[in-house]
Structures are given as C-alpha cells and as structure tokens.
C-alpha cells in the first residue's frame, strides 16, 4: 500500500500536556531524570525504560537501535548487550554515544550525550544472575549482529544450551556479554508545547569532581 504524501505531511499533534520552567527543574539533571522517569512509570507509558542508543564508527558513520535501560545511579545510565555486537564494536572504537528517551503519553523527551564504559564483570554477573533462565540462554545463544544461514541455527544452539544447563540456576556470564555505563556530559529535557513552541532545557557538565552542571534554555 502506498501512503499518500499529503497524508504524511498532515500528521501532527499540538502538545499541551505540560510546561518546563527553570524554577521547577531540579538543579541536578540526574535527579530530574529520575523524577521524569518515575512520572513516566506512574503514567503507565509503554516500556518507559526503552531508549534509542546511537553509536558511530571512528569515521563518524552513525547507527541507532532501541535498547533497555537496566540501571540508573549518580554515575549514569546502564544497559546490557553482547560486547561483540555492532554496537559493542563501535563503542570499543569510539565510546561517544547518545541516548534518547521518548514518552509520548507525557509529550516528553530526554536526550543524553555521554561516554560509554564497560561495567565490571562483578556488576554484569550480578545482573545476569537476576535474568530469567531463558534470557540467560538467549544471551549465550546469539552471536549478535553476525550473519547466520537461517533461524534453525539459533534454535538448535538454544536447544543444546537448554539441555546443558537444565536445572542450573547459576550460570556464569559469558565473557562476550555484559553491561555498559553511559557517563553523561550533556542532558536535555524536552517538553512538548502548543504551536511547536516547545520547552528545551539542557544541562552541560562543567566539572567532574564534584559534578557541576550548567542549565541553559534552548530555542525550540
């Protein structure tokens, strides 16, 4: 089915679900993110921890995909993946990354620029221990981002691992799998407003230890 060009151009929404003013924003952007994240959960946003992760090669060729936020503290944002995947390889060569959260139910968006670094094996093992058994086997099954002949390849390998680890709850995390911590140096909060006059407040890291942030308003 061909979608009419005029129809695509007509798709728009006039946002009127909130405002974002300097006086009602917490001075620490990590605390402000936690506040918005909690409100996204309370609003029952679909998968509020879903975030777009953008990486790039050393030559600047970008790629993006959706991953899930699995940890958050004063250091930054945590997700887990196969270190040998495309994103893992790109982070190894160029650890500048961007994250994007979009909660349409609240007309809110958060953009994060930061540096990705591997979590310790201990932290990755602790998270791996809490995953469902099937998810553990799934992580061990897939040579993520590699070309395979057909689906039977991974189905067969998964079945072999099911037999190998039947009845075993404790499984050692594979060397090729684990967490990344994204340490932010720029965080932007976006609140949709009427007539496309959106609110945009960005925080720029000024000093690492102790962390100091500068807040600025951006034109929509």
Image: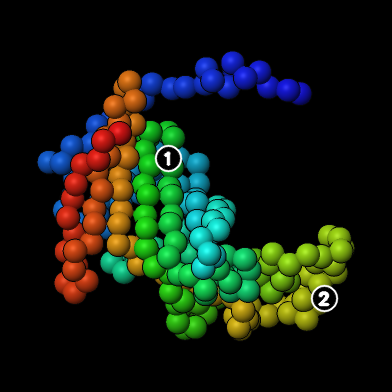
Which numbered marker is on residue 160? 2
Q: Is residue 59 left or right of residue 4?
A: left
**Which of the two discs, 2 and 1, labels the residue nearer the N terminus?**
1
Query: Dot 1 surroundings within 10 Å: few (below 14), some, or many (20 or more)?
Result: many
Residue at screen point 30% across, 34% down? 220
Residue 106 vertical position relative to residue 2 in the rendered view, above or below: below
Residue assigned mark 1: 103
Q: Is residue 54 left or right of residue 7?
A: left
Q: Is residue 217 visible?
A: yes
- Quadrant position of the N terminus in the picture: top right
Element under disc 2? helix
**Residue 4 percent location from the top left of the image:** 66, 18
Residue at screen point 19% across, 46% down? 216
Residue at screen point 32% across, 40% down? 190
Element under disc 1? strand
Residue 201 figure quarter? top left
Q: Is residue 89 left or right of residue 38?
A: right
């Amino acid at each position: 089915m061909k979608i009419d060009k005029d129809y695509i151009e007509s798709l728009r929404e006039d946002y009127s679900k909130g405002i974002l003013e300097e006086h009602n924003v917490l001075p620490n952007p990590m605390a402000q993110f936690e506040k918005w994240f909690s409100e996204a959960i309370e609003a029952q946003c679909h998968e509020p921890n879903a975030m777009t992760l953008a990486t790039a090669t050393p030559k600047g060729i970008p790629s993006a995909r959706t991953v899930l936020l699995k940890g958050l503290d004063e250091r930054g944002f945590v997700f887990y993946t196969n270190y040998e995947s495309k994103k893992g390889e790109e982070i190894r060569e160029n650890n500048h990354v961007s994250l994007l959260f979009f909660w349409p139910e609240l007309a809110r968006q958060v953009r994060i620029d930061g540096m990705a670094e591997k979590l310790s094996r201990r932290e990755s093992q602790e998270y791996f221990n809490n995953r469902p058994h099937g998810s553990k086997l799934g992580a061990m099954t897939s040579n993520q981002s590699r070309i395979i002949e057909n689906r039977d390849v991974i189905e067969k390998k998964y079945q072999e691992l099911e037999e190998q680890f039947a009845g075993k709850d404790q499984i050692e995390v594979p060397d090729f799998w684990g967490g990344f911590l994204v340490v932010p140096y720029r965080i932007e909060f976006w609140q949709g407003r009427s007539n496309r006059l959106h609110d945009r407040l960005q925080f720029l890291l000024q000093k690492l230890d102790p962390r100091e942030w500068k807040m600025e308003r951006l034109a929509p």
